[in-house]
Image: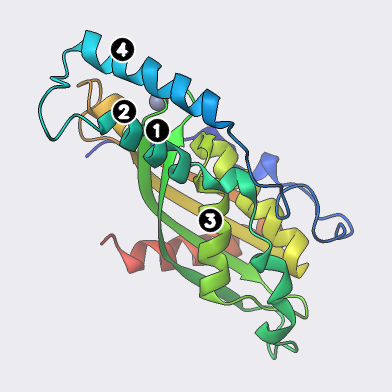
Amino acid sequence: MDEHYAENGNADNVIELGSPAGRGTSWSDLPPREIAPEDWRRFRTYMTEIFGAFGMELDLPGARDTPERYLQALYDATAGYEGEPKLLTAFPAEGRGVESATSQIIEGPIAFQSLCEHHALPFHGFAHIGYIAGDQIIGISKLTRLVRLFARRFTVQERLGEQIADALVELVSPQGVAVHLEASHLCTQMRGVEEHSRTITTFWRGTFADPELRREFLHEVRSHGRR
Ligand code: ZN
């Protein structure tokens, strides 16, 4: 297997933590998308035309409703544009008061599926998230929601990791955050460009400027292995 390490995980790329921003703003509390019925019908016509031209046998029973199903699947797979208010409201129940202020909390692997904005084809893999808590912690189910919120969009792996890290900073004001993403990109695999490659990216915030903390985090992530 080839491994591609993106260049954004280096020591000179640590972003200092500022004061935590207000909650419930740009990324968590978004309005639902509204597609007018006449637009949806038009999109379905386009998809029928495209699938037909590319060779799909639209008369087959299995394919007859594929344009509609495809649009619906794509719509569902991009639900991250509608935010995730639950990430904010459920917080106080997660608990306060962390005993050891310097030990890492590491969660993962968290499976995710996303669509690359270059080809609108899936990339999918696993996220590991580490943080040094301030006075709040966040459960694995919330972290999973957080990952999915940003994964269910047209995006790139680099932005996905940045957004997860920044949102976690906003949510729990930790001392430091580490995000590790490992993914396979179908846009390269399906077209035979790099059939077995996977892309690994890491993102660091705050106290993860410390190489020792990074080593500890990466060691833990690797020991979790891949499912
Ligand atoms: Zn792509």
- Say which of marks 4 and 3 sits in front: 4
Residue under the point 29% across and 32% down: 186
- Say which of marks 2 and 3 sits in front: 2
The residue singled out by tag 3 in the image is 147
* Residue sitting farthest toward the front: 38
Tell which of 61 and 197 is nearer to you: 61
Q: CA distance from mark 1 to mark 2?
A: 6 Å
Residue under the point 74% across and 69% down: 172
The amino acid pointed to by label 1 is Leu
Residue under the point 86% across and 54% down: 18
Q: Hey, which quadrant is residue 139 in on the image?
A: bottom right
Q: Hey, which quadrant is residue 57 in on the image?
A: top left
Q: Are marks 4 and 3 in contact (CB under 8 Å)?
A: no
How many residues crowd mark 4 within 10 Å: few (<14), some (14–19), many (20+)?
Answer: some
Residue 159 at x, y = what percent?
59, 38
Q: CA distance from mark 2 to mark 3?
A: 28 Å
Tell which of 39 and 227 is nearer to you: 39
Q: Quadrant of the C terminus?
A: bottom left
Q: CA distance from mark 4 to mark 2?
A: 9 Å
The amino acid pointed to by label 3 is Val
How many residues crowd mark 1 within 10 Å: few (<14), some (14–19), many (20+)?
Answer: some
Is any atom of residue 193 visible in this view?
yes
Applied colour scheme: rainbow
Residue 29 at x, y = what percent?
73, 54
Residue 26 at x, y = what percent?
77, 47
Q: Are marks 1 and 2 in contact (CB under 8 Å)?
A: yes
The residue singled out by tag 2 in the image is 67
Q: Quadrant of the N terminus?
A: top left
- Which numbered tag is attached to residue 71? 1
User: Disc 2 on helix, strand or loop?
Assistant: helix
Residue 156 at x, y = what percent?
51, 34
